[in-house]
Amino acid sequence: MGNSKLNKIKIKNPMKNRFSKITEDLYWARIPLPFRLDHVNIYAINSNDGLVIIDTGIDNRLTRKCWGEIIENISPTLSLSKIIITHHHPDHIGASKFLSKKLNLKVFAPKIELRRIKKIMLYTDIEYGKLLSQNYKEFGLDKKLIERVKHQGNSFKKMVKHLPEINSIENPLTIETKKGIWKGRFDTGHSPSQLSLYDEERKIYLCFDFLLPRISPNISVGIDDNENNVLDGYLKYLNKIKQKMDKNWSVFPGHEYPYTDPSKRALSLIKHHRNRLDTLLKAISKKPISVSEATEILFGKIKNDHDIFFASCEAKSHLNYLINKEKIMKKKQENKDIKYYYVIRN
């Protein structure tokens, strides 16, 4: 983080269980997660109407404990305004019920993200397990895994548990502070309509999960909509960032650490996904492949169920992109263990 702009903003590691000030109107804290990606960054903007808390972490005992300490350490000079959820994933929305009740604050989220989370939360354990096992069977994954996920329940609901009453956010969104104006934008890819925030004058971008500094965000199909071309939406987002945000912008992500030059990072991610698409296309030109085989080509052998879920659904999103570009086609196999293969389009 040797960039002069970030040094000017005086970025430091977030203090444990309290908001660290980044600028006069922007605060940053970190909540632990029980995954390999072991934390989520949460932010707060000190608006003219009070502190706007952005994202919450999953709902578990450790998250609640962390929030208790964060709240205790909020300066008494700061009033509280509302909670904003950027997108529907559990590490961002999970503890929203707990936090809104504890602070007596209203919760807001993008309309499309809200619709998505409500749909997922309505699935019973049996329905969710059935959906996931049907996907895995279509993907050609291991039979023992297919049988196992039938009985795992709604894993999404385990990290969220309950939803508060959530109000819809629609365009245009602005948050005014004494130091600037934060504008909202809605993008598709990692999720259907993630909200991110930026201050154009100061060139500060809260990208949340769409432009992480080191890893590519997961670009996955949904288990109830596995033909969706989500990668196309994400590549369009990256191209917009590449064109509009230069090296002088500071980026604050939903995971890991702040960095600069989002245009450079967007270009790197475009190349990353183009390489994956080329790799799949070369493999399919030699022989038909299943989603399971595409997953291994892109990610290698994966042993744990958590990673298999994300990797297989992301491999499927890349295959869907190639289908939509009329490079390959999906071919049904009758009376075969693997139901579908992907072949070069004639």
Image (spheres, rainbow, N blue to C red):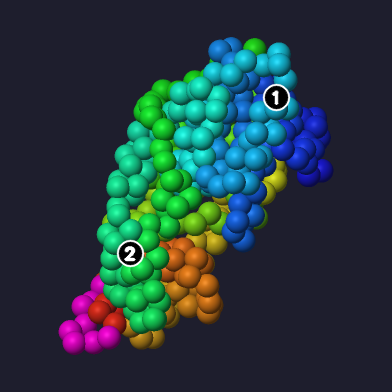
Going from the N terminus, do you reach mark 1 or mark 2 first?
1
Residue 35: tell me if it is visible: yes
Residue 239: tell me if it is visible: no
User: Could you give the CA–CA distance between mark 1 and mark 2, rounded to whole angstroms?
Assistant: 41 Å
What percent of the width, then of the height, locates residue 343?
30, 78
Residue positioned 64% across, 54% down in the render = 38
The answer to which quarter of the image holds residue 81 is top right
Asked whether, in this view, residue 190 is left or right of residue 12, the answer is: left
Residue positioned 51% across, 67% down in the render = 307
Majority secondary structure of magenta residues: loop
What percent of the width, then of the height, locates residue 147?
34, 76
* In-front residue for pair 230/151: 151
Chain part drawn in magenta: 330-337
What percent of the width, then of the height, locates residue 240?
48, 41
Which residue is label 2 attached to?
A: 129
* In-front residue for pair 295/286: 295
Quadrant of the drawing holding the C terminus: bottom left
* In-front residue for pair 174/47: 47
